[in-house]
Amino acid sequence: MKNKKFDDLIISLSACRNINDGRTRYKELKNKRKLLSNLEENNPLWTFCNVLGNKTRVHLLELLIDDEYCVCELAVILNKAQPTISHHLRILEKANLIRAWKKGKFAFYVLNKEELEKRLNLLKEKFLN
C-alpha cells in the first residue's frame, strides 16, 4: 500500500510539471524540506512570525503603540489574568519587541518601535523584493 501511494505521488509530480522523471523532482522537493527544517528558531524572521501568530500578543503590541502600561492595566483591558499577560509580555520582551522598566513594584512596558520597524523591513525584503 505504501509503495502505491509513493508511486501515485511520483506520477502526480511528473504530471503537475509535465516532466518525465517525478523521482528527481521528489528528491529536489525533499531537499527544500530540509532547508526549511534547518531554520533556526532564534532567526529574527522566524521569531517575529511566531510572536505575531498569537492574538493576545498582537493586541498587546497594538496597545503599546502609543502608551505605556503595567501588567495590571493590560490585564483589565484584555480581560485576562495577570500571569497570562506576563507570559505574553515575556515572549514579546524576549523577541525585543517591547521594553520594560520597574517603577516601584510595578513593571511598565512600551513598544520598541525601532525593532518592530527592523522586523517589518526584514519581512518586506524577504517577501516583496
Image (cartoon, grey):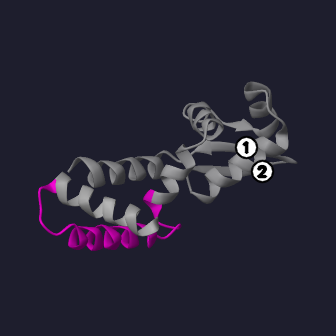
| Residue at 77% over, 47% down | 86
Magenta-drawn segment? 17-45
**For the residues bearing labels 1 and 2, Cβ distance under 8 angstroms:** yes
| Mark 1: few/some/many CA within 10 Å (<14, 14-19, 20+) | some
How many discs appear?
Answer: 2
82 left or right of 15? right
Give yes or no for residue 91 being in the magenta stretch.
Answer: no
Amino acid at circle 1: Phe
Q: Which residue is mark 2?
A: 102
Amino acid at circle 2: Lys
Identify the disc placed on residue 16: none
Q: Position of residue 82 (x, y in %)?
A: 83, 40
| Mark 2: few/some/many CA within 10 Å (<14, 14-19, 20+) | few
Identify the disc placed on residue 108: 1
Asked which secondary structure carries label 2, the reply is strand
By secondary structure, the bulk of the magenta-drawn segment is best described as helix
Asked which secondary structure carries label 1, the reply is strand
